[in-house]
Each structure stands twice: as C-alpha cells, then as structure tokens.
Image (cartoon, rainbow, N blue to C red):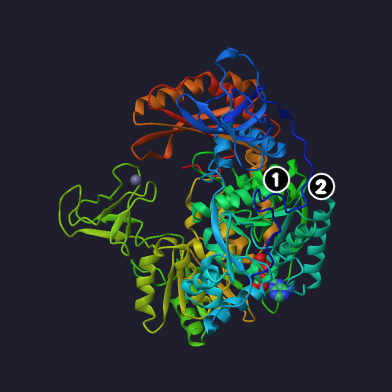
Amino acid sequence: MLAETWLHCLFCSTLALGARVQDPEFFEQGQLVAVLTTQPLDRFLDYKAPEGGCFRGSFVEVPLGPRKVLGVVWGPGRGDFDIAKIRPVNRVLDVAPMRDEMRAFLERAADYTLTPLHAMLRLATRAPGLSDPPSMRKVYRRGDGEPDRQTDARRRVLEALNDYGDLAFTLKELSEMAGVTSSVVKGLVKQGVVREEDTPRDLPFFRLDPEYAGKDLTDEQAAGAEALCAGVRSEAYGTTLLRGVTGSGKTEVYLEAVAETLRKGRQALVLLPEIALTAEFLSRVEERFGAKPAEWHSGVTMTERRRIWKMVGQGGAQLVIGARSALFLPYQNLGLIVVDEEHDTSYKQEDGVLYNARDMAVLRASLCSARVVLASATPSLESWANAEAGKYEKLELTARFGEAVLPDMRAIDMRVEDLPGSRWISPTLQKAVEARVERGEQALLFINRRGYAPVTICRACGHQVGCDDCDARMVEHRFLKRLVCHQCGETKPMPEECPSCKVEGKLAPVGPGVERLAEEAQALFPDARLAVLSSDLFGSARALKEGINSIAEGGADIIIGTQLVAKGHNFPLLTLVGVIDADLGLQGSDLRAAERTFQLMRQVAGRAGRAEKRGEAMLQTFQPEHPVIRAILAGDEINFWKAEANERRHAGVPPFGRMAGIILSSPDVQQVFDLGNALARNDGALREVGAQVFGPAPAPIARIRGRHRVRLLVKADKGVPIQAAVAKWIGQFRLKGDIRLSVDIDPQSFY
Ligand code: ADP
Ligand code: ZN
C-alpha cells in the first residue's frame, strides 16, 4: 500500500519530523576537538576542526596513521599533544550529527556493561557507507504532454503516475505498479511524457497514518491503551509493564501507544526477540498504519541498513521494528520503545558487547524523555520486581480477546505411562492428538531441542560422539545428514565407525530431538499432515514465514516444533498442545531455570485455543509434584512469582542482589587457571564494597572452539556499585598472551 511520502529536501533530505531544537557546541576551523573513533583505542584523539568547522556530535572522517577512520566529535580537544603534530579532521560526513542524548546513552551503556566506549560507537554505526558521499538513483514522475501513440501499457503507466499525484517512483516500482516492462517506461521517457530524475538513494519511508485503521478495542483494552497514550502525551520518561495472557491484545494496545507517539511527531521503536516474528508483525503494522515501517535486523540488506540508519537520524523513519541492536540507531526524536516478549532471553546479547536490550531500552528512554512499554504474558522476575517496587507502572489485560479462553492444563505422569524406551509420545497424548485431528483441528507437539538426537552413543564401547573443539556432544541432524555442534557450529558427516573403538555400525541415537519426534509422529499418525517448525529447517526468513502462514491456514494437522513456535505466531485452528518433556528446562544449574521453564511452558500452552475453540495443554512429566510444574498447571502466576522471588531474595541473587560473571579463555589451560586464581586472591577492590568472588571454576562448557574456559562469579548486595569495583579489580591485571577476559554484568546464562 502506497501512501504519500515524506516531504523532504532533495539535496540534504533534512528534517521531516518535528525535531526538537538542539544547539550543540560549534568548533571553528583549527580549534582542537576530541574525536572518538571506532578503533580499539582507550582514549579520545585530538584533531583540528576542518574548514567550515564542525559541531559536537558531528560524524567525521579522521586520519589515523596511514588510514582514514570514522569518528564522532565528542567535545573540545584536551591539547595535551604537541599541537604542531595534530592533524586536521579530513571532512565532516553527510549524516545528521550524533545528538547529545545519544552520546550520553553510549557513555552510560559503556559504563554499565564495562565495555570500552569505542565498542559502543561501533554498535551505533553498524551501517555500511556512512562516509560515502550521498549517492543518487533514478526516479520517474509524470512529465508533459501525451504519448505520440497511446497503447494499453502506456496508459497504465500514466494512470499509475496520475493516481499518486506528484510522487516519483523507481523504474522497478513503476513498471510493477503498471504491470508493464521497463522498456515501456523508457519509451515514454524518450518522449518527455515521463520524466527521469536523479534523487538521493536513501529515500524516506512512507508516512504512517495513526488514524488509518484502529481496531475497536474492548473496554479493558481501551483503558490500557489510554493509560499508555497518556504516558506518551506526557513526553516524560516512564516505564510500564504490560502484562496479559497470550491473545489478550497486548499488541493491539501498544500499537495505540505507537499511534499516539506518531501523532506527537515523535519516533517509535518496537523491539522483537526473533526475526521470525517480524514478517507476521510487519503485516499487522501495515494494516494498522497503512504503510510499512522500517525493519532492522541481521537479515536486512546493507543498502537498506544504511537507508534506515540515515532516515532514522533525519526523521524519515517514524517507526522501526527491530532486533535488539535497533536501540543503537541515531533516533532524532524517540518517544516510545516497546519491548515485546520482554522476558525473552534473546534480548541479552551473548557475544561481543554483553548487554541486555531490555535494560538498555529503559536507559535510552530515560535519557530522551521517552516511554517504555515492556510487554509479556510471563514477565521476567526482574521486571516483575521493578513493578512491585513501584519503579514501573503496571498494566494488566486479563481477558483473552473474543471467545478464546486459556487452555485447560494437565500433566501426563510419565511414570505410569506404558512407553517403550525409544518413544516419547505417551498413549494418553496419542489419543488426545487423534481426537483433535479427527475433528479437523490442529495439535502441536513441542520439544525444545533441535536436530534428531542430542546424543550419539557407540553401543560397543559407550563412547559419546563429541565436538573436536568443544566440550560438547555433537547433535545428529538427519535433515542435514550431519552431526552438528550446537556450541561452535562445527559439523561433520555421521561416521560409519565409532571414533573411539573403531567398531562399525554400532552408533545409535539417544534421546529425542524435533526431527526424531517427527519420525515417531509420522509412524503413529500415518494419515495426518505433519509440519516441522524448527529454525534450522528453513533456509531463509521468507521460507519460514511461508511455512508459518501455510500452517496458520490449516496446511497441517500436526505441528512438531521447537521454541520457535512459542513466540507469538497465531494458529487459529490449534487446540491441543502436547509438551513432550516438561522437565527438560528444570535440569540446569541456572538460577533462572524455574523461571524459564515456567515462561516457556506458559507461552507454549498459550498457543492453544486462540480463536473460538477451547484449547487444551498436556505436559508430559516425570515429576508432576514439582512446584514449578504445579504452578504451571494451576495457572497461578502471581504465586509462582512470589515463591520464586522469595527464594531469590533469600539467596541474595538477582533481582535482589547483583552479579557479574567473569569469563577467561585461552588455548592454554594452565594460563586461564593461573589468571583465575590470581584474580580470586587479589580481590581487595571487591571486598572494599562488600562484594564476594567465587571461583575460578571450569565453565559448564569448559572448552569452546579450542579455548579453555574458566568462570568467576562476583556477588554483591543490591545497592553495591558493582561495575566500578569490578573495573578496579580487573584493572590490576595485564592480559598476557592469547588470553581473553570478558565481563558479563547481570549474567543471564552461565555456560
Ligand atoms: P497478544 O499480543 O496479547 O498475544 P494480540 O494483540 O496479538 O494479543 O491479539 C490476539 C489476536 O486477537 C490478534 O489476532 C488480534 O488482532 C486480535 N484482537 C485483539 N484485540 C482485538 C480487538 N479489539 N479487535 C479485533 N481483533 C483483536
Ligand atoms: Zn564445537
């Protein structure tokens, strides 16, 4: 759907949104400025302001040795270098200067995560070609007169252009709209009937219309939407925890807050945990606002990334739907951040800069007077505790939209089921599935394990096939016909003989993965149409989207799925969810194991009965009396959170205490332990603030990609400035050789 485009100046494409006036410091040519570059240096570099001067926040290209690098003017230079040697800035780049609030955000985020500032700047400049001169492309619009000879194709081109007034289109857009080949357009250009023009390559996004197609909300939804909108109107920082069962309309409600943000002329960001979600989500946004928003995640092309980066900075993008790194885009006037499925663990970046996007969203918003909405059916204990403590406002949706009600939940006690060793679908579950499928409804069998079997064992010697580079077992993927290491991604063909005892033909799969479960289901339900939904079985996000759409339209009777299905897809025909192994998540030593299991099981169960049909969820478990399983079955969220909060309060662990993980790694096992022990012995800086250090201990996965891994854990009371103490503590040590140290503030996983 095309709507009007942004009005913008063709040459500099500046300002389309109601920007706030900002008056940054200006540096005349020759004045010293301090520049932060994306290079791994732990200080600012002094340069002379270039001809024409520059602003604090200007993106610049500066010489560094023989190279030219990207940087940002951070403030006045310090002048502690030989002034004669200081070189001038090469040039100021043609992008909007970094706003003061963004600089503050990067500084605060760097301090919080104990990450060097240059690494934060890299996160904030993850678009290619920012230093390229503005590039142009050809667009086409209505010219003068009529064609010498009117044809059907020509008439369609002119009609398409007339329909959109003075809008210009690319050759591809125009020929697609008119349903003609590009030569028809080119022919019209020759006659001057269509005009060809050069325009900047990075065009603004189509304008979203907040009044386009709002839904009629239920009373409860409307009250919730109004509360969020009032927050948006206040133009002051605030965070709301929006809690509501799956299907209660949280999305509808926060889209109203997005609409209000757009009415105020400010920008909105919706963070989603999974690329897979965005396709379905984007169509929903388009239905609501009449045009597509900007979409930011790892699957977006490089040119589109640059376009989004620039347009966000200039106000040519009103709404961004993105993965966590979208937080680091240079918004010009950000008024709202929604973190959907806020409990999702993928918000924690576990590679490179270790940050939690949910927490950073709150920080970002507090610095630019924006609102935050944290939406979830099963909030994280952190957010729940913040809401209880009054730091966040609370908003709850209790009813499911339409007729849909929460599914009936019950346990299948696997201790009494009659099931042979290598089968996982109990007779009870089997009957329930058959009954649903006979009625033309869908059943979902859920198992949170990719691949065919988690373990491959040799029946001759007992050897378990492991990864050469990691202390991890390799997982058989029959679909790929290979063994895959889920730690490092290494794959190898399934060996004929045991790598240890060399006996042939004795390797056997142990335990179920989603592919093996599919095989069992195929045998049990030979007439049913099966669909397997696992992230690694789809070549692309588009293929996945098509798979999901086809299932939603009834293209399968039984869905076999991993965690992927737990996340927000609507399957209206789905009425039964069978959880194959509800105990799986409870086995880890992770302090959040109970919380994660509770969230995941609730989310999965929430897939059932979203439309008018009543749903049912069955959990296969060997420990039906386990408190977590019982809380899930009873649907007793509040009591679960209370009990879990109590346990953590007693243990002094997050969110009631603070933690930092230190991970050391090196190819040399002695080296990591030596450093680990030295850290543990010299913990004065930690003891000063009352923090304690535990370890060193081999990490649960003691070797990844050939590097030995050792962990230390720092624990402190809630009020303790743990970052400063940790920085001082590790600052005593110089890292020698190929040893790496990373700090994980508020660790989410302990692998
Ligand atoms: P949640 O985000 O809480 O899981 P959604 O917002 O996705 O819930 O709503 C679930 C389904 O119900 C969606 O298909 C949505 O479009 C529909 N829905 C919710 N509220 C309304 C409403 N007021 N009018 C029409 N459809 C609605
Ligand atoms: Zn490996």
**Residue 114: x percent and y percent?**
58, 31
Residue at 44% in and 32% down: 697
Element under disc 1? helix
The answer as to whether callout 1 falls within 8 Å of ligand 1 is no
> Crowdedness of circle 1 by 10 Å Cα count: few (<14), some, many (20+)?
many
Q: Image height check: is 299 above or below 419?
A: above
Q: Image height check: is 102 above or below 492?
A: above
Which of the labelled discs sits on residue 548, or is there none? none
Q: Quadrant of residue 495?
A: bottom left
Q: Specify whether 593 is left or right of 368.
A: left
Q: Image height check: is 476 above or below 350?
A: below
Q: Residue furthest left?
A: 503
Residue at 69% in and 49% down: 14
Q: Quadrant of the N terminus?
A: bottom right
Tag nearer the camera, 2 or 1: 2
Q: Quadrant of residue 3?
A: bottom right
Q: Nearer the viewer, residue 425 or 610?
A: 610
Q: Amino acid at mark 1?
A: Val
Q: Nearer the viewer, residue 592 or 624?
A: 592
**Residue 171: x percent and y percent?**
52, 67
Q: Nearer the viewer, residue 57 or 509?
A: 57
Residue of label 2: 236
**Residue 312: x percent and y percent?**
65, 50
Q: Amino acid at mark 2?
A: Ala
Q: How many marks?
A: 2
Residue 411 makes an appearance in the image: no
Residue of label 1: 362
Residue at 40% in and 26% down: 673
Q: Nearer the viewer, residue 538 or 565?
A: 538
